[in-house]
Amino acid sequence: LDLGTNPEPVAITGTVSKGSDPITGLRLNLQPLETGLPATLDIKDGKIAASVTPGKYTWYISGDEKDLAAKGIPEAFLAGSMERTVEIKGGDTLSLTVE
């Protein structure tokens, strides 16, 4: 039985903002849709940088409930959604916006 192996992680960077304001002190969660492994990235001053397994992901924001409320993160962005996907190939610069 061959379960397959995931490719080596690749470096990604990017920005995460709510409208035009950078998000900080929360986490970006990447949930694999086909291949890949779940990843949780710290968001600092609106920026992310990490090594992630290539694949197609949905993304959402997590953190302390008080922080999420204080930063006005909408409920729709607290869980993955098929309407919000990103493809990770390597060397990617993501630009994600919470609206």
Image (cartoon, rainbow, N blue to C red):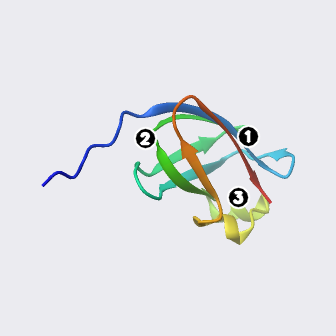
Q: Position of residue 55 (x, y in %)?
A: 47, 46
| Percent coordinates x, y for residue 13 in the rendering | 62, 33
User: Tag 1: residue type?
Assistant: Gly
Q: Mark 2 or mark 3: which is in front?
A: 2
What amino acid is found at the position of numbered circle 2 in the picture? Thr
CA separation, marks 2 and 3? 28 Å
Image point 41% across, 34% down: which residue? Answer: 9
Q: Secondary structure at mark 3?
A: helix
Label 1 neighbourhood size at 10 Å, few (<14), some (14-19), many (20+)?
some
Query: How far, Cα to Cα, is label 1 from label 3?
Result: 15 Å
Q: Nearer the viewer, residue 5 or 17?
A: 5
Among the two numbered marks 1 and 3 on one chain, the one whose residue lies closer to the N terminus: 1
Residue 91 as seen in the image, left or right of residue 15: left
Residue 50 location (% of width, % of height):
53, 34
Q: Amino acid at mark 3?
A: Asp
State the residue position of label 3. 67
Identity of the residue drawn at 59% across and 43% down: 42
- Residue 53 is tagged as 2
The residue tagged 1 is 46
